[in-house]
Structures are given as structure tokens and as C-alpha cells.
Image (spheres, rainbow, N blue to C red):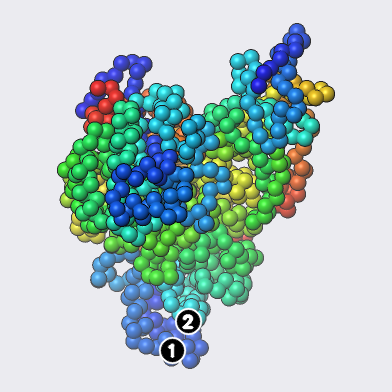
Amino acid sequence: MTISVDKGKMPIVDCDVHPLIKDINVLSPYLAEPWREYFLGGVRSGSSNGFIYARARDKYNHPNTTYRLDSLPDSGGPAGSDPAFTISNHLEPYGITTALLLPQEPYGVARFGNAAAAAAFERANNEYLIDTWLSYDKRYTLAMTVSSHDPKSAAADIRRLGKMPGVVGVQLLILNHMAGSPLFDPIYEAACEMELPVAFHQNGGEGCYTYSQNPAGGVPRSYGERHTVLPQIGAANIMDMIVSGVFERFPTLRIVMVEWGFTWLSWLMSRMDHLWEADRTASPWIKRRPSEYIAEHFTFTTQPLDEATHASEIAAMFGIKNLDKMLLFSSDYPHYDTDDPQLTIGKIPNEMKERVCFQNAVDTFGAKILRSLS
Amino acid sequence: MIVDCARHAGVKRHQDLFDYMPHSWQKHFDRYEWTGAVDLTSNHIRVSSKFRHDPIPEYKPGAEPDRMTLVIPHQGLTVNGWADRVGAKVYLDALNSYGEAHWVSSSSKLAMVVSPHDPVWSASEIRRRGASPKIGGVCIPLSTEMLGTRHWDPIYEACIERGLPVVIHYSGVEGSYTGAPPLAGSVHQNALSRLILMPQLAESNAASLLFEGAFYRFPKLQIFFAGFGFKWIPSLMRRVDQEWRNFRSDMPWLLDEPSKKVLSNMWFSSYPVGEAGGLVAWEGEFSAALRKRIVFNSHAPFGNDTVEDVERVLGKTWVDSMMRNGRALLRYKTGTEA
Amino acid sequence: MSVKHTGAGPAERPEHQIGKLEDFPEHKIVTVEIEGRKIGVVRSGDAVHAFANRCPHHGAPMCAGRISGTMFPSKPDEYNFGLDGLVVKCPWHAYEFNVETGDSLGGIMRARLPIYHTEVRGNAVFCRLTGKKRDALVTPPHLCPEEIGYGPD
């Protein structure tokens, strides 16, 4: 679907904006017992916000803050917890037409062993954001969060909430199973039925626990070293989905890879193609060139954009095959490693700008991604 | 002259190593499950799910006098999945001795394999064997201890003393055997998945070397990542520099962009060159300085890239560059161009 | 923060009195507006420093940043803290800049954070929107790699 645009009024879809909740007690109406008591009773009711980290901060601790210091709302609460402030601090200044909300609180369930608790928390978070953020301003859209603790329960939630106005995708938390595992099939089936793309974003727990996914090799020493190799996990899950034949089972499934980078795609696509060509019996579920699956089913966000300086390097980065149809603009507001939207858009080659700023988002999420324009 | 910086050789029978072991250790290893496992040990490097493989042709050193070859005893790399770390040293000692006796010629040198579990023993082995012109490099099987940590210092010191590059090549049990390093993600369901992801082991260990300041501790250390290809390097270089800029104060021993140490202290190999097609699209990411760090390797007898393959995919300029680079990499031992 | 314009020389930007010394606490950025421009001001001892409200990296508002010190370039696994109170960290990527010179710490980028001429006379603090002269640096000499023990290979 192509949406024509007035010159000078190009829509911008920001495919990575993180909302938080100010105070976990706001989830109370959305939690049935025993989960209300589980999450809000006892010690937890004393916390000023609902923030539950997945990253083990006594294993990997950020040297500064994970959020931009200028993104703390005037009304209090953590960065990203005020829908009005996010508009004045981010959407308005940069002319963002749509912010795809990828809820951050639910990442904490990556640490949960209790599947029912995880599902209850995500359900409450989804419903709260639908009621508050999505109804606050049509520039907000939501990738509702589910995890793979209980795929059938996750599928039921997708079917129940997937048609709510403003819900445009599913944020699926990657736990210890690779994304190509048949474990995820109920979730992929529901997502396809509801015509919702599935977004994968780091949950923070990567490399922290015996039950989380990890980068290759061993244990990175510092936050920065870990951050360098984190994209490997994104690449590995893309590979696994293709090798496992997910797209043969779900030919309409679309995947959005958020905040994994994209410049390593050149290596991944060519290596997968070459090794598959060398021995097509190695995986019976791959029916055609792996890079074709990537081009048809995957999109990638711009942030964090590699800071290349040489023109030939920048040209090679943006010249990755089919990237013009795969790249989605993103800012990662309000995180510390945000890319300034104007700077990013300025770096995108002119011939790709419209596609990256909004057209690829429309192709991925449907026209409803631009609901604020209707 | 063709310079093949990584090809492989192995024993056909584990019993072939017995002459190089103390008598009682021969008797220890002489059990049918271990001697019968030579096929497993020999084929891990293929990273294949197949049950049957073509027989591995025997390596005949000196059969190609027109090329300079660095030979990796690939079976030794698999000690990174061994449980018996003491026995592993006896095995490696025997394999290295066998290799010196059978795989070295005027046109081939051995990349001796050391124990990742015992750096002090390994360092003494490097000093003992490394004095010989038969040795052209030192293979460290990958372990869960990342290459940037001080665990490896005794080995690095010894390598520098002997003028030998460190050679890193996957054994094939990574991501599969317990104790060996994991691959990215979690459990992978088949060998194709693991083979695709092997280069990320090099990526992670390169990042570790850079961020731990290993090349400030050892400015002369040369690390050769063999068998991992090279297309992934530019993306990594940009990412390490970006993280350094964000977190310099957290790693203040990095005095400059970490990617610069890639250009002065790391080497990479061409295999499998077939994944480097479409040169025009990606060549712009490779500076002249980075191209100087990429050498040719055949990965023979597994896969077996030829110089003609490289020329077909990359062109003659790259071939010539790789041969020059290969001579530069291997000269640390000879002190002269190979 | 009220600002009093105190006149200017013919070829210079005008000097403004931006407050009294006690108006500027140590380790804290005070935002001041001069000639319609927001700048960040921080005191260190009896000196006051002023810098632009725009990070040269991505344009983040430096007035929302933090004042701290930094870790000097060092030998592996060593930390040597210094320049306490003289480093402004960008509120986004935490790039560090020396408030006295505008240079990035550790040479992470060539572009400098613009800094402005400030002067303390008596108890009054003055600022002029002109670049400050790069006087003798307070940065200790042992930032040089040779001092740390590294030399050519």
C-alpha cells in the first residue's frame, strides 16, 4: 500500500519508543487476585514505579543512566512514563507522526519462572497502556507484549486485544528458546490471524542468566562490551527462524527486529545463502535462498545507527540488498543511546527516505500505523 | 608464491599418536571408545549433521612446493570439549610431536595446539617447541574464558618471545559440547545453524581483546582468526568504536579508538570465500588498512577454497593482496618474507 | 537567573553579569539565558565556567547534563579519577567534555563543546558569548601515553 505525501509534510513513524508506568499501583484495576496481592502487596507497594529490570544490575551495571537525563517528566516518575511529556519532549519537536510503543516494564518478566505471573503482568501492562496512552493521543500505537512462558495464553491475549484501536503489533519477549522453536507456533499463528507483525527487542536479561540467551563465546566483562555483541542474538534468532522453517509454516508472518542494528545483515545473508547452497540437505525446512526470507519477512530499525564517517562505508551500509524495503526509522526514546531523529533522517539516502520514514512502516503494520492522520 | 594460512591435517587413527606418548598414557588412551572416536574427532570441524563423510585425504607436506602453508592439527582443537584436561595435555603433546614429524616441510609449518585449560603448561610448550623453525603459529582452542582476559597472558608472552602468531579456529564443538564456548542465542537445533554462527565466536573474542586492552598489555601480539571469514569485521569495528565513545571512562585504558588495534594486531582469513560475493556492494566498508589484514586460507581438506575461487569471487587485486598479507603474517617466525 | 548587561568593547560581544559567586554551586549546572541563548554554568572553586547548551555529537541539551570528574587514560585495569567538578557529561550518550577547554575527554571526538568567556570580579560573575582562550590546561601531564608506560611497538 502506498500513501502519497505532501511535500514538506512527510510522516515520520518512530518504531521504537518506550513507555514506562509511573507507579505500579496504577495496574491495580488490571490485576485480578492473586496477582494484585502478588505484585502490589507487601514490599512492592512501596516502590515509586513499576519498573522491574530484566538485566541483572549486579552483573552488568550501566556506568551512567540508561535513560536520557532530559527525558525525566516534569510531573515526576521515570523517563518515558508521562504520555504528555513524551509528546512535548519528543514527538512534537521532531514532527513524529506515530510512535510505536514498545513497553519496557514487561521485559522484567524475562526473569520470572512463574508463567502465570508473567502473563498476568503483561496483560495488565497491555490493558493499562491501551486505556491510557492509546486513548491519550492517536500518535501512539502499541506493540502489545507477550512472552513465551505460556504460548497458548499469549495467543489468547493476542486474539483478545489484537484488534483494539491503536494495537498494531506484538512485542514477543525472547527467553531461552530460539525464535524458530515450534514452541512459538501458537503465538505466530495468532499474530498472523490478527495481521499483527511480531517485534523482537532486547529484554535486558541477555547474557545474565542460565535461562536467557547469550552472546557467543563467553561472558563480556563490561556493559559496553556486552552491548557490542548483543546484536549477535538478533542475528541468531533470524537465522533460527529461517532454518526452522517458520516462514514456510507462516507465510504471512512479519518480524520487526528492533534495536539490533542492521549493518551485520550483509554478512549474515551472504553466509546463510552460501552455506545453504553448498548443502541444501542441511536443513530440509529451507525451501529457497535464506536471504529471500529475510527480505520478505523482516524489517529492521535504524537505531542504533553505526557512526560511519567515510562516504564509501556509508554507501555500503545503506546499500545492503533490499534494505530500502527493510529499514524503519527509530529513535529508542527515552534511552541514553538514542539517535537524534534529525541526524538519522539526514543520513538516510534521499532515495530511501520516504520508505524509511513511513512507507516501510505502512507496508509492515498496515495503514493503521498512521491512525493520527485519518 | 601462494600462501595458505590455514589448512588442516589429522591422524587417521588415534593409535598413531601412541608412539609419541609415555607408555602408561598409551595404555590409558588405548580403550575402544576413544580409539573408535577418531571419526568424531576428525569430523567436528565440518560442523555437519551428516552421519557419513567422505574419507579425509591424507596431508602430504611438500607436495605443493610452490606454496607456503600453515598446518592446523584440527583434531587438537577439540580439547575445548574434553572433560579430561590432564589427558588433553598428553594428547596435545603427542599430536604436536606427530605434526612436527609428519606435516612439516620446507613449504609447510605447524601451528602447534596448546591447552586452553593450562596457560602455564602451554607457555612452556610454546617456548620449548617454538624455538624450532617447524612451528609457524600457536593454536589456542576456544574456551569460555574470553581471549582478552589475563588468563592468557603466559601464552601471549611466550608467543611474543618466539615471534609466533596466535591462531584461533573453531573446533566444531562450540555450541554443542558442554565446557566449550556457547554460540549466540541458546540451543541450536542443527549443525547448519551452528556453522552459520561460528564467526560470532571470533567477533566476541575480538571485542574482548579490544576492550580488555590486551594489545596495550602486549603491543606485539598478533591474533589470527582463521576460518571465520571477514565480512563481519567492519560492522564490529564501528560498534566497538561507538561503545568506546559512549563508555570511555569505564575503560580508560583504551587510549584510542579500539578499531585501530584491529588494523595492527588482528588477522582474518578468506574461507569461505563464497560468502564474500557481490564485492561491489560491500567493498566500500573495507579500508586499505583493513584489507591488509586479510589472508588466504584453503580450509583444505574440508571445503577447500582454491586461489582460483578467490580470484573468481574477489578479483586478482584481492588475491595479490592476500598473498602479500599472508607472507607478512607468517614472517614473524622466519624474520623474512616467506 | 537574571542577567545584567554591563556593556561591551567595540569589537566584542557584550559582557553580562550573570550573578554572584554564591549563586553557582559546585558540581551543579545552572542554566542561564544570555542574549536569548541558554548556556550552562558551573563553578569550580573560585572559577566559573560556561558552555553551550548543545552537545556537538547529537545536539543534546548540555544544560540537562551532569558535572563530574573522569577517569584519566591509564594502564589496563587501573582507574585514576580526576578533574572532579570540571567535566560535563552529555545527558544522552554521556560524552565527557572539559568545561575549561570544551575538549572531549580521551579524544573521543574532534568537535569541541563551545565554551564561553567568564570572569569573576570580586563576588560578581560575568560572561561574554565569545570563545574562551585556551589557556594552560589543568589536565595533569600524565595523560600522555608515554607517561603511562606505553611506547612504540
Residue at image point 35% right, 60% down: A113
In this rendering, the answer to whether A100 lies above or below B8 is above
Q: In the image, which disc is placed on residue A115? A: none
Taking depth in this image into account, of A295 and B155 the one nearest to the observer is: A295
Answer few, some or many: residues within 10 Å of disc 1's Cα (few below 14, many 20 plus, some between 14 and 19): few
Q: Is residue C55 visible?
A: no
SS class, disc 2: helix
The residue to which callout 1 is attached is: B28
Query: Viewed as shown, does residue B123 lie left or right of A232?
Result: right
Query: Viewed as shown, does residue B182 lie left or right of A153?
Result: right
Residue at image point 47% right, 65% down: B144
Amino acid type of the residue that numbered disc 2 sits on in the rendered structure = Gly
| Badge 1 vs badge 2, beta-carbon distance below 8 Å | yes
Taking depth in this image into account, of B285 and B175 the one nearest to the observer is: B175
The image position of residue A334, as x and y in percent, is: 45, 36
Amino acid type of the residue that numbered disc 1 sits on in the rendered structure = His
The residue to which callout 2 is attached is: B87
Query: Viewed as shown, does residue A12 lie left or right of C78?
Result: left
The image position of residue B69, as x and y in percent, is: 47, 63
- Dot 1: chain letter: B
SS class, disc 1: helix
The image position of residue B308, as x and y in percent, is: 36, 52
Q: CA distance from mark 1 to mark 2?
A: 9 Å
The image position of residue A357, as x and y in percent, is: 35, 28
Whichever of labels 1 and 2 marks the residue nearer the N terminus, that label is 1
Residue at image point 68% right, 17% down: C3
Answer few, some or many: residues within 10 Å of disc 2's Cα (few below 14, many 20 plus, some between 14 and 19): some
Q: Is residue C21 visible?
A: yes
Residue placed farthest to the top in the image? C10
Residue at image point 69% right, 31% down: C42
In this rendering, the answer to whether A316 lies above or below A241 is above
- Dot 2: chain letter: B
